[in-house]
Every structure is written in structure tokens, then in C-alpha cells.
Amino acid sequence: MPTKDRQRQLARAKLERQMARRAAAAKRRRQTQAAVGAGIALLLVVVGAVFLVANLSGDDDKDTTTEAATGPKCTYQKADASTGKVKDVGTPPTADIPDTGTRTVTMTTNVGTVEFTIDQAGAPCTSNSMAFLASKKFYDKTSCHRMTTGGIFVLQCGDPFGDGTGGPAYRYGTENLPANQHPPYPAGTIAMAKSQEAISVGSQFFIVYKDIPEDALGADYTVVGKVTKGLDVIEKVAAKGVTPADPSNPGDGKPKQAVNITSFTVSPAAS
């Protein structure tokens, strides 16, 4: 049996071993905590860098969007049954739409040639659509289906079916309304026909051959251009009168002198 001194020595040695193990364990814990702390710090640095890059990229995107927003934004919606019959030749481009200057339209008909400019600055979406349709020969070999001679003085064209019920496979909204012009539709004006729906402009347009009084037609129709040559051709057609669609409205119907469009071209956009 060990003596008391030996017992104390053994107890002291045991205590020293326990303290050594505890010190080693504490050291390992400190090393682990240090490694974890370093990992967290590194993670925070990486997250911060990603956040910074994302924010910088976002600013660049915003700048690009702002720049793009300065150009015309044209929306051409698919036509539905409520907008009439459809001749599908595709949809106009919606990028890089010209929004300055004018282009020249040459409309060759069986009764003479009419030239007019389209205003890309005032009506870029309409000009873009008309130029697109012309490039597809949409207007070629169509007829001007309506003439009005009582209060409203227009020849209406642009329906591929020749009866006032048709258009392309898309529709879009109005622009360049003549609210501050008096009269709103002077002789020589080229404006776009539409129905009562908000998004109903298509291919049909009307040529004003005599000033329209302000109380006869509201400023609700897109003004896209102005006749520069051949207005007398339309005046001569108007002088021959109309075949009324409704006997109670003798000044509205098909022109007695048929007007058939043989070709419809738009000059190239300025580079």
C-alpha cells in the first residue's frame, strides 16, 4: 500500500496530466476559433466585393436603360377580332427607330402621283410602321375606299381589303395629335384613321384635301405627314363626288372616281 508521500506524488502527477490535457484542449479551441474567425472575415470580404461589383454593374445598367429610354418606345400589339380583318406581313422593328427628319412617300395611282413627307420626329412610331408596310408592298394594288365631301374633306386609303374593315396584324396607339393646331387638319394633312379603341391605329390613313373646321373633326388622329405634290389629284377626285354608303349621308362613301394605288414607296431613312 503506498505511503502518504507516495500518494501525494501520484495525485500531483495526475493533476499535472489533467492540467496539460486541458491546456492542450484549450489551445486547440483557440486555434479552431481563430480559423473560423479568419474564414468569416474572408467571407465578409468576398461578400463585400460581390456587393460592390453588383452595385457598380447595376449603376451601369441603369445608365444604359436611361440612354435607351431617350429614344422612341414603340409598342405594336397583336390585332384581335375587334380591330377587323388582318393581312399579316409581320411586325415593324422596335429598335433603332428613326426619330429625326422626314422621309418621302411616293404614292402612284391610276389618277396621278401623290407625294408626301412623313414626320419621323413628331410621329416616329407611325412613320416606322408606314415605312415597314411599304417595304412589304402592303399598300401596293389597294384602293382608296372612302371619300367624304360634307364638312370633313378626306380621301381614305390603306385598307388591304378595300372596304374599310382591314389592316395589318398589329395595332398601336396615337401620337402627334394636333391639339394646338388651328385648324387641326389643314389641307394637305396626312393623318391615321382609327376606331374608338385606344390601341387601334393600323395601316389606314386619310388625305385632307380641304381645311377641316375645328368643330367637324376632333384632334384625336395622329398627324404623320403633309402632301408636297399632287394634292390637285385628290381635289379632282373629290370634285367628281361619292357613291354614298348610306343615302341619309350623301357626302360619305366610295369615290365615284376610283383611286387605285399601284405602288407605294418610302425613301430610305437618312444615315
Image (cartoon, rainbow, N blue to C red):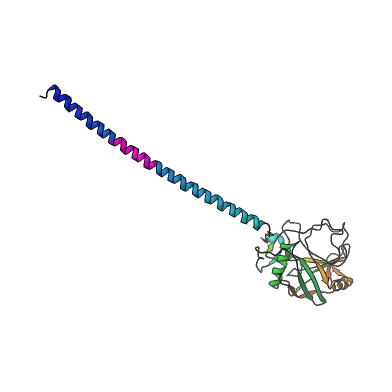
Q: In this view, does 241 lie above or below 80?
A: below
Residue 193 on the magenta segment: no
For this rendering, which residue is in front, 195 or 13? Answer: 13
* Residue at the left extreme of this rendering: 1
Quarter of image, res 97: bottom right
Magenta stretch: dominant secondary structure: helix
**Residue 126 in picture, x, y percent from top left:** 73, 63
Q: Which residue is found at the position 44% from the left and 46% from the top?
A: 43
**Residue 53 in picture, x, y percent from top left:** 52, 51
For this rendering, which residue is in front, 234 or 180? Answer: 180
Q: In this view, does 116 lie above or below 13?
A: below
| Quadrant of the frame with the N terminus | top left
* Residue at the top extreme of this rendering: 4
**Residue 88 in picture, x, y percent from top left:** 66, 68
**Residue 106 in picture, x, y percent from top left:** 77, 73
For this rendering, which residue is in front, 143 or 47? Answer: 47
Residues in magenta, as a range: 24-36
Residue 32 on the magenta segment: yes
Q: Is residue 52 above or below residue 226?
A: above
Quarter of image, res 186: bottom right
| Quadrant of the frame with the C terminus | bottom right
Along the horizontal axis of the image, is 82 left or right of 45? Answer: right
Along the horizontal axis of the image, is 22 left or right of 152? Answer: left
